[in-house]
Amino acid sequence: MDTSALHGLAPSLPLTDETLLAAWRVKADNLQRAFAHYQARETHLTSLPFRSIIELTQNCNYKCPMCAQAWDPKYQRFDPDLNMPLETFIRIGEQLFPTAIMVDLHGFGETTILPYWPDVVDYLERFPFIEWNLVTNLSLSRDEVWDKMMALNFRIGFSCDGASKETFESIRVGSSFERTLHNLGALRDARRRHRRGTVYFLSTVQRSAVHELRALVELAHAYEVPEVQFKIVQGGREVSLEDQLRSIGDLSMSRHVEAAVDAALELGVRVTFNDPVFVRRLDPEKLARVSAPIVAPLSPKSFWGAPGSAAMAPYLAQLDDSFRVAVNKNCFKPFSFAYLTYQSEVGPCNCMMPNPPPLGNLARESLAQIWNNDAFQTFRRGILDGRPADERCQWCFEHRVED
């Protein structure tokens, strides 16, 4: 494994109060300018994206039935050509991370199986005031890496579709339930040590696992995970897994949902559902209680909780409101967000993954050049005028009310 890209880096500045304040001010100024351009309806920006997804790989070590990784010939064997080279990631980081406040490090693959993932985690320590996000299958057998990720205040979404060995391994094909539970324990212990980091469950509910909704909530509580997000399955090679799930009927579904919600209320776990099929028979008041947002104090090491950040509170409210695309009939993403594929292509939005429109490539241009090229400015103008060309943007203009 070639890690020479890390060796050529200039030493990072000591994170003193002075350097931390300077780093925070750069990010705050960038964010303010992004909003100013958006409100002035300007397509040429002096700011850079401050939220991003970076897809490091399209390789995955599992072959789950709801995912093309299970049947597309492209993904049947580990292919190094589907990985972003470490030197490319470093080049992106040097351009993006000084202004970033949120970076998600996953795409259409399992990031943690990369040979250089521990080196990436070490590299991230150079950049304060960034919320690091990752969705993972928790298959990595390195306790020290999970520990460091919690120390860096990672927000980890764990893909967990079953609460028993039989169900979990039948859906997450190639997995080890025992190893997964070990890693959940490692994350729990690291959160206790560092008092930082977040883990939540992402459960794509399938007919074969719907009877374990309550058990999934209980499993989350056992490992001090405060939230479970239940999602309807969209996919399947020959048979629609979504239709299979719906076929169990409202009465059977409501029985399992009710049991999960009761457990969540008893145990203090937040539970959310992304489709009416789950909650048609559920008491709306009970649903509101179990899905109420978790209000946690902001860490002084986060961008929004740093000393002096109170002045940025109105921008946080504006950012939250900007996700209500269907209500506002506009979108802030082309002014604030970049999606970067493992091939260095730059797209405008996470809602377009895994195939965002390529508006530039970091192998040929700098991030600053791409951010203001003709393609990006044309995309922004279509959004500002309420006439997005991409059908995925059109869907958001009609339906999206959250990020």
Image: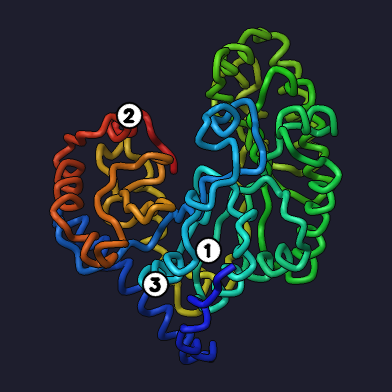
Is residue 239 depicted above or below 14 in this figure? above
In the rendered image, is residue 289 in sight? no
**Mark sitting on residue 311:** 3
Is residue 226 in sight in this rendering? yes
Tell me where residue 207 sits by quadrant: top right
Most foreground residue, 102 or 251: 102
State the CA–CA distance, disc 1 to disc 2: 28 Å
Q: Which residue is mark 2?
A: 395
Element on which disc 2 rests:
helix
Q: Secondary structure at mark 1?
A: strand
Q: Residue 373 at x, y = what percent? A: 16, 58
Mark 3 surroundings within 10 Å by alpha-carbon count, few (fewer than 14), some (14 through 19), many (20 or more): few
Q: Do the CB atoms of the residues marked 1 and 2 lie less than 8 Å apart?
A: no
Q: Earlier in the sequence, mark 1 or mark 3?
A: 1
Crowd tier of the residue under label 1, counting other residues whose Cα lies within 10 Å: few below 14, some 14–19, many 20 or above: many
Give the mark, 3 or 2, whose residue is nearer the N terminus: 3
| Residue 252: image location, x then y, percent | 73, 11
Residue 304: % across, % down: 48, 67
Q: Give the amino acid at mark 2.
A: Trp
Q: Residue at x 66, y 62 (%)?
A: 197
Q: Is residue 166 left or right of residue 44?
A: right
Q: Residue under label 1, please give it.
A: 131
